[in-house]
Image: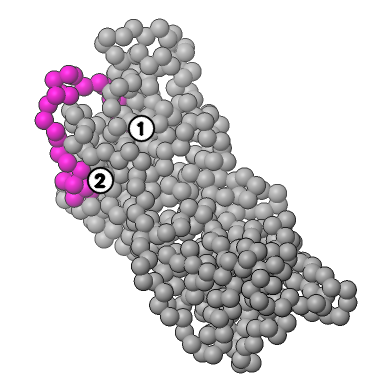
Amino acid sequence: MQLCAYALKGYDGLLVEIEIDLRRGIPGTEIIGLPDSAVKEAKERVRAAIKNSNYNFPRERLLINLTPANIKKEGAHFDLAIALAILQGSGDLELSEDFNDKVLALGELELSGRVRAVPGILAALATALEEGVEYFIIPHENMAEAEAIVSGRYFAVKNLTEACEAVKHLSAGAAPSNQAAGVTHLVKPTEDSFDFADIKGQLHLKRALEVAAAGKHNLFLFGPPGSGKTLSMRALPSILPDLNHSEKLETNRIYSLRGELTDGLIQRPPFRSPHHSASSEGIIGGGKFVMPGEISLAHNGVLFLDESFEFGKHLLQNLREPLEAKRITLARAGQTMWYPADFQLMLTANVCPCGSLGRADKVCLCSPNEVARYWKRLGGAVLDRVDMRLPVKPVSAEELLGEAGESSAAVRARVEAARRLQKERYLKLPFNYNSAIGPAHIKEFCRLDNEAEKVFLLVVKKLELSSRASHSVLKVSRTIADLAASRPILPEHILEAASYRRYGDNDLYWTSI
């Protein structure tokens, strides 16, 4: 039997083989292969766990090698594999001689022999499957993650004794029994999720949210406090379709690396709303163990930056590369790791530092220079990658007391229909949404007839749009046409898309509030 563990190294990671050498000499245990402190301490945890599980710890000199030796090994999830390898090497774990299959074992050991849950199970199993590993031994608490990807090929154990029995079963040719009874799939709730019916008035705003959701376009709302920006953004998750199978695996794999999956899987698009005091490592990723940040936790979902100008300017500029590449590459201390970061960026901001500009009942005391400096915090490079920008005004008292509008269920049905059209259209391409159409495919998928082309050229000239801005108008037009179930892009689709691109390129943002 070849016992393997898993080294966390970005989104991919790699398998680690456990080698044991017992030789005559003064009793002692040494772990080599670039172990960190947690791995070095495993020898004491493993020694106590083996003795307290009524097995014999070898009295010879023990050398444990973690291969490959040039990759740093971090974390306590190596414990279980090391313990099983020691018992196999000492002869306490008797196995069939012809049993040479690879077995992945993951779990942290308590001194009593109990196996604790560990992060990264889903990522480890996915990597092991690619490497041809047949069977898996995991902590019982991580069962739901295993059930999603290796159903019927794993043992979920509660202690070291059960792990040894699992290995004996495999050695005897017995397949793992179905242990998934009672496993539930967690649907993580979105934060403060509202229904579209809760948004009174603001028909133009609700339409913009629908278009953004249908084509996965980035959206920026700006307006005075109390105009409904945050409420509207919080209602966005209610109109997003469920994740498909591949998106679920990608999303849950990232959350597994963070140790945020314990009793099931995420079914809905994640909605991440970090506070403006969050660090760059918290948003982008990194830190001592180079973990995924908020942009990766929002993969296949939404990253919502409320009051975006309160975030650090440097942090906002760091969003530019992942917005373009749909992934983030982190270089730390001689090692490079990457994580997916295909998220939909949603931004809100006040119009001026004091928040009074744009309100009829308030007087703004900010100077034009102060307002200009305030808007420069976002930066043109990031804003240029936001397809839709919309000013928001407070609703009247009469509108607040009016009837509830269209429900999220009705809007979501239209969004799902538009998403289906996009999925069929881009079936053989590496993207699924209109927002991801690249320059090479613009002409093919955003074809205009003579009348629509005249309107588009007039819009580009009047608004003085750059090449990227012009492409944004075409991509948003394609989404608007999909919502109308229209194969051609019509002039009215171009005009509506242009209305979402009027602000932020060549005029003062606050002049239309």
Q: Nearer the viewer, mark 1 or mark 2?
A: 2
Badge 2 marks a residue whose secondary structure is helix
Name the amino acid type tagged 2: Ile
Left or right of 450, for residue 171:
right
Q: Is residue 197 visible?
A: yes
Q: How dense is the environment of label 2, judged by Cα within 10 Å: few (below 14), some, or many (20 and up)?
A: many
Q: Is residue 7 left or right of residue 384?
A: right
Residue placed at 23% from the left, 56% from the top?
A: 421
Return the residue nearer the eye: 219 or 428.
219
Residue 209 picture location, percent across and down: 27, 38
Q: Residue at x 21, y 34 (%)?
A: 198
Q: Is residue 391 magenta?
A: yes
Taking the magenta stretch, the answer to whether it contains residue 243 is: no
Between the residue at mark 1 and the residue at mark 2, the CA separation in whole angstroms equals: 18 Å
Q: Which residue is mark 1?
A: 220
Dividing the picture into quarters, in which one does residue 465 lie? top left
- Residue placed under numbered mark 2 in the picture: 239
Q: Which segment is the magenta one?
A: 388-415
Residue 462: image quadrant is top left
Q: Is residue 351 above or below residue 381?
A: above
- Identify the residue shown where x is 37% and y is 66%: 183
